[in-house]
């Protein structure tokens, strides 16, 4: 019985390399992204990659975004935005923790977190601020 080799391998994750002259896009053969790339690039049979010229940067970024991907330089530009989202998630997690606890256990949980997360204990200031904000927001709730 013939084996389906495609099922035996790990799926190939799309990747983009910036050569300084052009973008090289690595895709699995069956990836639907290859159809979109056909409009802005060409298939290099020797290197087995899609070659997208620099002047198609915006088109490539748009296509990648549709598939939940991004060029590294676009990710670097979004670093502050990503950091803010992560901090918001952390704050929401601490708040959810305190809200889930009975009121009588909240102070003890906050103190336990402080023993690990406080800057004097080797933690960082931002994390401790998030913990304190979450505790303060839930302190008076039943």
Image: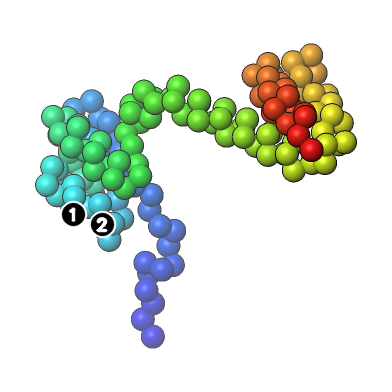
Whole-percent x, y for residue 93 in the image = 65, 37
Crowd band around label 2 with a 10 angstrom C-alpha radius: few (<14), some (14–19), many (20+)? few
Report the residue at 33% width, 26% height from top.
73
Give the number of callouts.
2
Whole-percent x, y for residue 17 in the image = 30, 35
Report the residue at 46% width, 29% height from top.
82
* Helix, strand or loop at mark 2: loop
Report the residue at 82% width, 41% height from top.
102
Q: Nearer the viewer, residue 126 or 47?
A: 126
User: How does the figure colour the protein chain or chains?
Assistant: rainbow
Residue 129 visible somewhere in the drawing: yes
In this rendering, the answer to whether 79 lies above or below 17 is above
Crowd band around label 1 with a 10 angstrom C-alpha radius: few (<14), some (14–19), many (20+)? few
Place residue 95 in its image quadrant.
top right
In this rendering, the answer to whether 2 lies above or below 120 is below
Left of 127 or right of it: where is 35? left
* Residue 32 image label: 2
Q: In which quadrant of the rendered image does the C terminus lie?
A: top right
Report the residue at 42% width, 62% height from top.
9
Left of 55 or right of it: where is 85? right
The residue wearing badge 1 is: 35
* Residue 141 image label: none
Left of 46 or right of it: where is 27? right
Whole-percent x, y for residue 139 in the image = 77, 29
* Helix, strand or loop at mark 1: helix
Please say if the residues under marks 2 and 1 sit with CB atoms less than 8 Å apart: yes
Whole-percent x, y for residue 105 in the image = 86, 36
Return the residue found at the far top.
Answer: 120
Q: In which quadrant of the rendered image does the N terminus lie?
A: bottom left
């Amino acid at each position: 019985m013939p084996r389906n080799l495609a099922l035996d391998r790990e799926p190939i994750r799309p990747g983009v390399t910036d050569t300084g002259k052009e973008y090289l896009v690595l895709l699995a053969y069956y990836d639907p992204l290859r159809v979109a790339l056909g409009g802005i690039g060409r298939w290099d049979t020797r290197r087995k990659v899609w070659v997208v010229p620099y002047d198609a940067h915006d088109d490539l970024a748009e296509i990648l975004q549709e598939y939940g991907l991004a060029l590294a330089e676009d990710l670097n530009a979004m670093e502050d935005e990503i950091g803010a989202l992560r901090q918001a998630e952390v704050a929401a997690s601490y708040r959810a923790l305190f809200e889930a606890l009975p009121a009588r256990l909240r102070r003890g949980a906050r103190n336990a977190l402080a023993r690990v997360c406080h800057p004097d204990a080797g933690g960082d200031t931002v994390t401790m601020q998030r913990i304190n904000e979450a505790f303060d927001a839930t302190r008076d709730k039943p």
